[in-house]
Image: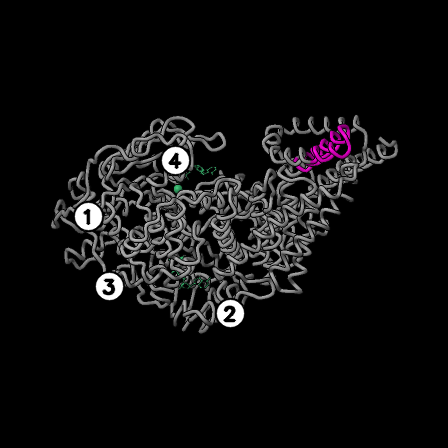
Amino acid sequence: MACDGAIEARGLSYRYNPAAGYALRDVDLTIAPGEYVLLCGASGSGKSTLCRAFNGLVPHFHGGRLEGHLKVDGLETRDHPVAELFAHVGLVFQNPQAQLFNSTVERELAFGLESLGLLPHEIRQRIRWAAQTVGLEHLLERSPRQLSGGEEQLVAIGAILALRPAILVLDEPFANLDPAGAAQVRAVLREIHHLGTTIVVAEHRLHDLVADADRMVVLHQGQVVLEGPPRQVLREDVTRYGLEPPLPTRLFREWGRPEVPLTVEEVLALTPSPCAPFSLSQTWGGWRDDGEGPALEARDLSFAFDGREVLQGMSLTVRRGECVALVGANGSGKTTLIKHFVGLHRPARGQVLVLGRSTQGVRVAELARQVGLVFQNPNDQFFAPSVQEEIEAGPRALGLYDPACCRELIALFGMEPLLDRSPYRLSEGEKKRVTFAAVMAWRPEIIVLDEPTTGQDKPFRDRLTRLLGELRARGHTVVLVTHDLEFAEANARRWVVLAQGRVVADGPPGAVMANEAVMAMANLHPTQAFQLARALGLDLGQLSGWSGAFRRETPAEASTPDP
Amino acid sequence: MLRLKLDPRTKLILTLTYISLLVLTQTLPALLVELAFLAVLLAFLGLGRAWLRALRLVLTMAAIVFVISLLSFGLAVALTTSMRLMALVTTFFVFFQTTWPEDLGNGLVKMGVPYVFAFILTGAMQFVPIMARKIQDIVDAQRARGIPLEWGLTGWRYIPALLTPLLIQSLKLSDELAEAMESRGFGCPNRTFMWEYRVQSREYGLMAGAIAVVAAVWWLGF
Amino acid sequence: MTTITTRKVAQAIVLTALAVALSPFFVPIGITKVYPAQHMVNVLGAVLLGPWYATAVALAAAIIRNALGTGTIFAFPGGMIGACLAGLVFRYTRNIYFAALGEVVGTGLIAATVSALLVGPVFLGKTMPLLTFIVSFSASTIAGSIIGVLGLLALRRAGFLVTEARTREA
Ligand SMILES: Nc1ncnc2c1ncn2[C@@H]1O[C@H](COP(=O)(O)OP(=O)(O)OP(=O)(O)O)[C@@H](O)[C@H]1O
Ligand SMILES: Nc1ncnc2c1ncn2[C@@H]1O[C@H](COP(=O)(O)OP(=O)(O)OP(=O)(O)O)[C@@H](O)[C@H]1O
Ligand SMILES: [Mg+2]
Ligand SMILES: [Mg+2]
């Protein structure tokens, strides 16, 4: 095995099929052995395609035409099938569920090694080594189905790592993880990097990760538009490409300083403290703070799956007109809780009230008139041939169809150009917007969004922030369930933290993040804005306004390419 | 869950032997003895509770068989028929509860079953809970916007609301799975197996004994 | 092993899991219920994967349902024969409606007869009345085949239908 771990692309272009546009265009890229590369770009920019090209799935699995040259670990991918490349370039995918297909973690780690034709004792050795490196020893006997999201991702990484590939490629490995899970995966990646493995991570959220990487490669519409060490790349304006630089970088740019700090520590090292050369701006106009009475209430609510208590006597009140973020670890019961608000789950003990009325005995369709629940995965609901029909399906089924209202909504969401398209042919961000519209279409007073930003890029998040502002202005009550604390911080003045089925904290983001015990219990990490504000001695109570002050309005709307 | 430390092939042969025993014996007392043996086995393996949980769906099937045979042959036949059906189901159940899917696959491959089929079987076992969760997610998402998809499909009208997302996502999932399989070397020509079982001599004894019992029962004509 | 095989194996795995996970679903018809899941999957498998894989899917689903205790011995003939026939019919006609017809004939007539005349006596010691089998098998398979065809049409409309002989590049 010529294990150098280098990647070299020359004039690499690729189309999935002759009718489609180029997913990769003329990519020239050299990655040295042992480098840690962050591959970033907006949704649809070609990150996943390039990752697949590295281990030969493109073109051997997907078909289509690959032009130019791509050499990985000394092998020209075009001439070697995936069955030969997989041991040189390990590829970890975004969805851990789909890549775990064995009955125990140990067998999961063994599968690739068995493919290599190793002997049982070698396999055992390698499994032990991989399990140690990734920190899975205590899970080896478990079924992958009994793991948390973060553990699943670690198993997926371990299963690839056991092959000892010279290059490890990961496609959005943090997408569904809570902050602590993400931090754990990051630490494992740093460890693997220290062992000399080349690492490529595709990701569109830069903030933490960028400090780990030796090099950043920015893709835009299939082309490499920027590359180099992170500090050098971030000197450029990456918002053009739908990316958001980390807060410290943005801050220094705003202050007009030449340095490009990546972490809070660097900012502090570079700033004579305490200082606050920027102003607080409140961006919270037009919404009622302490509204008139409760919109949603859970009283001593308990719920169990197969005898396992997921909600354990939790209580929560959301007032009308409020915007509340519900945060907490993977599996803490957030989704389970919000399903109670429309009656998809019924309390085992305790009570749920919607607009002051108990949900007991009230049908789902009845509750849905008041509570619009938008789930995480748009593909779970599309069935109509066009976006228009998709949006109208809900109100028609509920008997609340109002053409004028739908038209107005479609205008609000900027979806006129999409109406006749098939929902399945939209980009991920557009799909997400259709699901919002499909639920807003009958104007439920209360709107509950489950993980609205997962896998979404910066332009989408900006757009969603504006939309939420609009909803608040119209007096809707909004509940946001999210792992994305930056987004929660920018949009909700009240956070409710769930851990093990109980509410462990409830208050303004600043106060919540200041409580280290709660943050640790809920697998959360304070945002960079919070860390900075605290270190610079600013008022924590007002923190929620901060990211508003830091946030830059971008004209990046148009930079999401339509496929 | 208890997994018996026997070669999967031995377990398979023992299971098949027991099934032929069930098929060969015709009298009610024999059937009762066989059921009693299964009950003891369930208790011994600590599978009683799991068995009761799994039973609900089979009971409807057994009830249908019971009614059909009651109407056409009378009570005695109806009883033995539905009891034999239960015994068959339980035998399968015990076998699968005591055998890791991969071991079964491994055993099947050694018995000449194509690897691809063994892999489909073991892989599908892992994906059943994933698909069940997926179905639940879709039903929830649709019901949350007023589309009545209660368990059991109350109307034909909304079948597409379940079916379309379900099938499209199944295809997407299978593409992701295929990519993951390729990336882990599925289909490499000289695959080894980490757990190699060898049929021990006492297992041959076990198999011979079991077959002898069946032959004796058949010979004596119960 | 080629990419096409890998893809087929993956689809077979997912379809099998789908058949098992959907097996508790029923459609009420009058006072009785029919369980169409396996027959729907048979039609899908026949068109997407061809006769051999479709039969393998039905076999694997029957084994797993027996393992989980959600199926009985009748799951074997009740699924495999229809799947195989539907696959063969589709291979030679390339028409999804004929494939569904193959499934209906395979299950409603052939599998019902086999169950009544073969599986019944051998495993249960009695010949079961043929007509009851034909009626109950037919109800399930007709419902399942209709749903299967609806599913295929939905997939085609969404542009996801790639039938067994063609590959993805098309
Ligand atoms: N399997 C596929 N078949 C056809 N076209 C595809 C396929 N996968 C991706 N594409 C197209 O290729 C282009 C690049 O997509 P890709 O998935 O590589 O983007 P990405 O940067 O990974 O985006 P995201 O952040 O949303 O994951 C897009 O226009 C997309 O529509
Ligand atoms: N349908 C189900 N059957 C069995 N267990 C379930 C089901 N849905 C959820 N659970 C379990 O309940 C617990 C809480 O799940 P829930 O989805 O509410 O968590 P969450 O806070 O939304 O997590 P995440 O951030 O990962 O979405 C988890 O341990 C999960 O495995
Ligand atoms: Mg991607
Ligand atoms: Mg959730």
Q: CA distance from mark 1 to mark 4?
A: 44 Å
Query: Mark 2, mark 4: which one is toward the viewer?
Result: 4
- Badge 2 is on which residue? A78
Q: CA distance from mark 2 to mark 3?
A: 34 Å
User: Which residue type does callout 1 highlight?
Assistant: Leu
- Asked if labels 3 and 4 share a chain, the reply is yes
The three-letter code of the residue at mark 2 reads: Arg
Q: Secondary structure at mark 2?
A: helix
Q: Is mark 3 within 8 Å of ligand 1?
A: no
- Position of residue A370 measured from the top left corner of the image (x, y, whole percent): 32, 40
Which residue in the protein does label 4 denote? A340
Magenta residues span B65-93
Residue type at mark 4 is His
User: What residue would you read off at disc 1?
Assistant: A268
Task: Name the spot of residue B180 as percent of width and height, x first.
Answer: 51, 55
Residue at position x 43%, y 53% from top? Answer: A382
N-terminal-most mark, 2 or 3: 2
Vertical placement of residue B97 versus A55, above or below: above
